Amino acid sequence: MLTQPKSRILITGTAAASDAGATDNRRIKKRKQQGPLVDKRYHHHYYYTERHQPQQQRQHQKEKQEEDKKEEVCSKNDKNKGAKKRKITWSELISIFHKLGLPLFSMPETWLQFNHLGRLLRNKRVIQVISKILNVVLNVIDKDGRKCSRVLLSAYMMTMCPCEVFQNVHGSEEKQLLASAKKVLQHFEEIVHSQENQPSLTTKLAFEQCWNGYYALFESWKSNDMTQLVANMSAYCMELMRLKETLGKQGDDDGVNEQLDQQIVQVKERIHAVGGASALEHLAEAEQALHQSYQQQDAARTSLPGPSSVPPSPTPRPERSTVQEEPPSISAEQLNRLLGGYAPVSGITNQQLAHEIILDPDFKLQRASTDEDPKTLEQQVRKIATQAFFDAVEEDIKNGCPEKSLPPLMDDVRQRLLGLVRSGSGIHTQIKETMDIPLIEQQTKQKIFDLDEKLQYVIQVMRQICAPVRDEAIEAIGDIDNNVHKLRAILEMLDNMALDLGNFRLRSLRPHLIPVAVEYEQSKFAESLSQGQVGLAKTRAWLQQAKKKLVDVANERNPENVPTSNDSHLSNNPNTVFEEAFISLLISSEMISPSWCPETILLDVERITQYQNELQSITIVAALVMLAKNFGHVGDLNALAGKLFIMLEDGNTTIDNLALEIERNVRIIDEQRRPMIRAMVNKTVSHSDTVYSLLMRRVASVVRTQLNAGKFATREVLTSYGLECVRKPLEQLCVRVMILGRHHFQVYSQWYNDILVNDDNNN
């Protein structure tokens, strides 16, 4: 998972609200003067408006025109000068301030959580009232007052939520700024809680002196922080661009590039909001340099002389193997160590994990089991046990015994967070210091541990390091009221974030894995053989059966045993014997099982089972379409084939359903033919029909050609075989079978050669 750059909620910035527009005299109703009235358009600015009774229509036209001209001039010069304004008194302003509900610096029990405090401080009314107070105390104009207001409100955030605001709470600059913020809030409280009608000159000077120091420190910290934030977001954006370039066309086909484009746009918007146009210009220069480097690499590849033939490779882009600038190779030991970090998450071995990464470019780590929708007994038991555990945690907290459950849980959260960030980084150090488990143990024993505050910190860290697609889910976790439920949701989200990071790293690992994949799998299989974990008895019987079949076919074609130059070529060629054994396994009517399959196939039992099902579905559809054609099909055969594929994927489909679909698509003249159609459909699905057997052999021939020559059958061949209607799914399956077969033979060919040579010597 790509590391999301840290962003903070800052109160400083451009004011969202602007002053109300100028008054249009022609829209004001004529009414008698009734004294000072409150103009609703100015209810956020705390001004009282006084209007005088306008001239009646029967008054002189000249006076009316002069009044209109004055209004027009006032509208152009100042939007708010169309009405006469009177500022409210200092005591009225302080009264309004006390109604805002701001926490008191001198009373920590009134302090709010990060999210609640942020929402309160971003309120327009709060910003405007503080602005008016600072206008009086600092003698600044409204515009500067609004900016100062946000700087002062940031002091609340720093003081009450330092862990969420500062990246390094213990930094020297941060400590100095925090101390200055506390001092400013202390002086500010003295002003707003004073009983004086106006703040005294001494009070103003004391606050101004304290304010100037705080303001300078704040601007310096903000500048450095914004620069670092822009740099982090720019680096993150470049990582997304590199990933998109790496995926190339494959990302377009899978829809991944579209998601990456959306994330890139979001990050650029954040960069512009924080760093402005100049930050985007720097990013554009880096992006252009990145594209130029990829173009130079592509040009270097096309200029290199390639070999006459490309060796078999399990990758979907074999031309990459001719490039001199390959990713740096890694040793088998390094690879084993890298894979070891992901195997426990996925619940599979290192060898299986490497095998899946090579054969499936879209492979993703998934949880070994899920409690969301338990289907097995084990998952149901797991769900019940998990619920019981968190119920016990909640009961401990209610009974005043948090020390029993919370320290181990917080340690679990701490370890998961540390696993998601780079060791030695600033945030890694911050997590270790903030999530101090011995301190948490002491606090829980003394009943002073603030679980809510700690969970808010965890959520803030998660928000900083997660992928953008997780933002909404993490925000939802922050809105959970029950802290135990919130803790459970945090643990589940940390699991998902670990999978996100693992999948991103595995995708990055694949180019490094490809050059050593065969050697790595060979070493792991040899290790299993030497330790006696597996044998080769089933593999030997499998190859011997395939070799015998090749000999029998050769004898049938040459009943008189006429000597030829290729007498023993086919049956002694390991590649040919393997192809025959491999194809026979795929077209077998018996589903492959770990209990009897060759030892070299154990890693691919599930994959081969899927291929068997697909081959049978393709053959059944081809046979049913041929049946409909023989009974006088009217309509589109490809459309019929598509419907039949959908019906076969549905586990509730019956023989009668298939027969009824065939009947709908044929012209039945004699009603006695309906039972005949059903009987033939039944024989086809049960694999006992001669047409099915014939088509299965033809399908096997197409697969064998793909595996041997790397080319799919031509349209003419498919038409002659009766397979034109299943062309697309058959071609897709052939490509996957070829990738699996070639990689498999590269890994295990040395053992296959030994088995066949030993058999020849024994005979």
Image: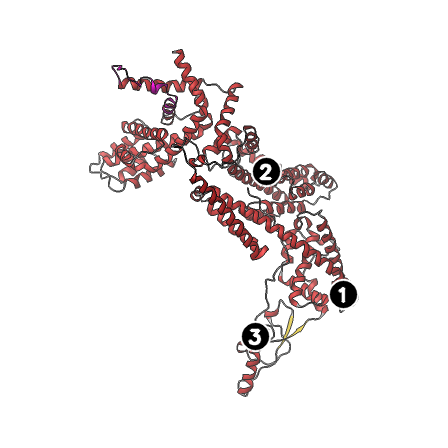
Q: Position of residue 338 (x, y in %)?
A: 56, 33
Where's residue 747, x and y in %?
46, 26
Crowding at dot 1, Cα within 10 Å, few <14 / some 14-19 / many 20+, comes out as: some
Which type of secondary structure does the marked residue at label 3 adopt? helix
Q: Is residue 307 visible?
A: yes
Residue matched to label 3: 76
Determine which of the numbered discs, if any, sits on residue 204 in the image.
1
Residue plotted at (59% across, 36% down): 386
Q: Position of residue 223 (x, y in %)?
A: 65, 55
Question: Nearest the camera: 96 or 541?
Answer: 541
**Looking at this rendering, what residue extends furthest in the top direction?**
762
**In-front residue for pair 267/563:** 563
- The amino acid beneath tag 3 is Lys
Tell me the crowding category of disc 3: few under 14, some 14 to 19, or many 20 or more residues within 10 angstroms, Cα based.
Answer: few
Location of residue 548 (image quadrant): top left
Q: Which residues are magenta?
A: 558-579
The secondary structure type at the circle numbered 2 is helix
Rounded to the nearest angstrom, the CA distance separating label 1 from label 3 is 36 Å
Q: Nearer the viewer, residue 242 or 500?
A: 242
- Which numbered tag is attached to residue 387? 2
